[in-house]
Image (cartoon, rainbow, N blue to C red):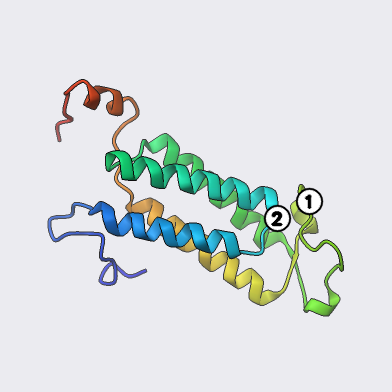
């Protein structure tokens, strides 16, 4: 994504929440369609949904929550890069993506691999754009405290 294409950043460098929420909604739908093992898909979806919900509720996400999803995405990318690829007729028959399969037994076509890597990379870019406050500030904000620059 090019910064000229991103609707989420204002001229003053601040981030608008609604375009990010829309982007997270798109990522949640994309994650449902990616040919990943069920355990990985569930983990990505749950962590992404938690970030989207937190962003909608408060306008920011604690960095530890973003870091967790960044780690999950990085693990998924590593798994996909290590996956066996081939033409559909040469991949294992059933099931192609069994739950709990070690990454060296992932099997996907080159097109599926490209689609998954594109989707996960796009999610990473959205995570980087997500506004954060240091851990503990959400409680302080509830008490009326405000961070200073």
Question: What secondary structure is marked by label 1?
Answer: loop
Who comes first in sequence, dot 2 or dot 1? 2
Work out which quarter of the rendered image holds the N terminus and state it. bottom left
Q: How dense is the environment of label 2, judged by Cα within 10 Å: few (below 14), some, or many (20 and up)?
A: some
Residue matched to label 1: 101
The alpha-carbon separation of the residues under discs 2 and 1 comes to 7 Å
Residue ID at (38%, 37%): 63
Left or right of 132? Residue 51 is right
Residue ID at (32%, 45%): 56
Q: How dense is the environment of label 1, judged by Cα within 10 Å: few (below 14), some, or many (20 and up)?
A: few
Question: What secondary structure is marked by label 2?
Answer: loop
Q: Quadrant of residue 112?
A: bottom right
Residue matched to label 2: 37
Query: In x, y percent, where is residue 75?
Result: 61, 49
Left or right of 137? Residue 109 is right
Tell me if residue 109 comes above or below residue 13 in the rendering: below
Query: In x, y percent, where is residue 74?
Result: 56, 51
Work out which quarter of the rendered image holds the C terminus and state it. top left
| Mark 2 touches mark 1? (CB < 8 Å) | yes
């Amino acid at each position: 994504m090019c910064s000229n294409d991103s609707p989420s950043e204002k001229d003053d460098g601040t981030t608008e929440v609604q375009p990010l929420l829309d982007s997270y909604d798109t990522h949640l739908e994309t994650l449902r369609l990616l040919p990943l093992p069920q355990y990985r898909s569930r983990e990505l979806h749950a962590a992404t949904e938690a970030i989207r919900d937190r962003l909608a509720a408060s306008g920011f996400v604690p960095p530890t929550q973003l870091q967790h999803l960044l780690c999950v995405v990085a693990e998924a990318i590593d798994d996909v890069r290590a996956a066996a690829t081939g033409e559909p007729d040469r991949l294992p028959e059933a099931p192609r993506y069994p739950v709990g399969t070690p990454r060296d037994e992932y099997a996907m076509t080159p097109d599926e691999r490209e689609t998954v890597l594109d989707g996960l990379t796009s999610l990473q870019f959205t995570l980087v754009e997500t506004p954060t406050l240091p851990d503990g500030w959400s409680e302080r904000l509830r008490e009326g405290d405000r961070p200073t620059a």
